[in-house]
Amino acid sequence: MSQENTKFLTAEQVKQLAPSVFQTEAHERLSDKYVHVQTHDSLGFMENLGWGPVDAIEVKSRKADRQGFQKHLVIYEPLDDSIKFTGMDNLIPRVLELNAHDGRSSYAYMFGILNIICRNGLIAIDDMFSAIRFVHKNLDLAAVEKQIETYVNNIPHLVDRINTYSEIQMTEVQKNHFAMDALKIKTKKTTELPADLLTVPRRKEDEGDSLWKVFNVVQENIIQGGVKYKTQKKNTTTKRINGIRKNVRFNKELWALMVAWAAKLSKK
C-alpha cells in the first residue's frame, strides 16, 4: 500500500493475519473445473478503486491438509473521506471480501457499516446492494473484476440512501410500532416485552428520533440482548441472538423493515 495512514494494512500485515489470502493454488482435492481466484490480487485492485485493507481474518482449519486453503475475509475501508455519512461521523463504510481455496466458500463481496462507538459491524442487505457471489466454476475473471468494480463504485449511492433515512423523523408511537415489528422478526411467539424498552439508546450518541437512529438502537437491543423487563410471573432479561446465520437473517429482515418504513413515512 502506498498510503501513509497507519490504520491501513500492508500486504505483509495482511499475510500475517490471514496467510490463506496469499494462497496461489487451489486445494488438491478439487477438480480441474474449479477456478482458483487469488484473493491477494484484490489488494491492488481495491486500492485503485479507493479502498484499503484494515483487517484480515481466517477460520481455524480443523484438518492439517486444509491449512492455508480455508475460508478467509479481508475488510476494506475508504482511503479518503469522499464516502461518508452526513452528520454520523461514528459510521464507517466497509467492503468485505470473502473467499476460500478448498471449495467450501463462494467468492463474495459485501457492503458493511462499522459503528465505531459500539464496534458493531452491520452488513447492509439492500435490494440494490445485496452481496455479490461467484461460484468457483466457469468464471471469467475479467468479468468478475468488472462486476466487483461496478458494485464497489455504487456504494456511495447506498450511503446517500442511508443519509436520507437519517432525515426521516419518527414519533414515539411510530418508534414503538417499529420496535414491535422488529421483535416479531426475532420471535414468532407472543411476548410481554414492552416495545418502548427496545427504543432506549445505550449511549448518548445514539439518542434521536430519526429512522436510522431508531433502526440502530432497536437492532443493538435485540441482537445484544440484556433488556430487563417484568412479566406477570417473574423478572426476566432478553437473550442475545447467537450464531452467524441467525444474526445475518435478522439483520437482513430488519434492513428490509427499515426500507419499508422509509417508504411509508415518506408518503406522509
Image: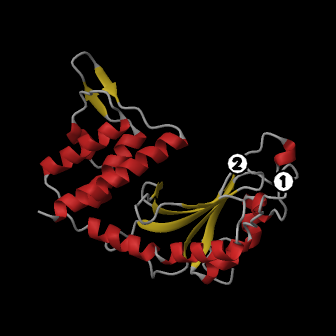
Left or right: 28 with respect to 9?
right
**Kind of residue at disc 2:** Val
Using residue 35 as the reference point, say whether residue 255 is left or right of it: left
Front one among 142 and 266: 142
Q: Secondary structure at mark 1?
A: loop
- 229 or 85, which lies in front? 85
**Image quarter for residue 157?**
bottom left
Nearer the viewer's eye, disc 2 or disc 1?
1
Q: Position of residue 193 (x, y in %)?
A: 25, 31
- Residue drawn at x 43%, y 36% is 240
Q: Determine which residue is flagged by label 1.
A: 31
Q: Amino acid at mark 1?
A: Ser
Measured along the vertical axis of the image, is residue 190 above or below residue 29? above
160 and 33: which one is in front?
33
Colour setting: secondary structure
Against 22, residue 251 (above or below) is above
| Residue that carries the numbered disc 2 in the rendered image | 59
In which quadrant of the rendered image does the N terminus lie? bottom right
Residue 59 screen position, x and y as percent: 70, 48
Q: Position of residue 50 (x, y in %)?
A: 56, 81
Secondary structure beneath dot 2 equals: loop
Decide which of 11, 69 is in the foreground and name it.
69
Would residue 203 be visible to someone looking at this image? Answer: no
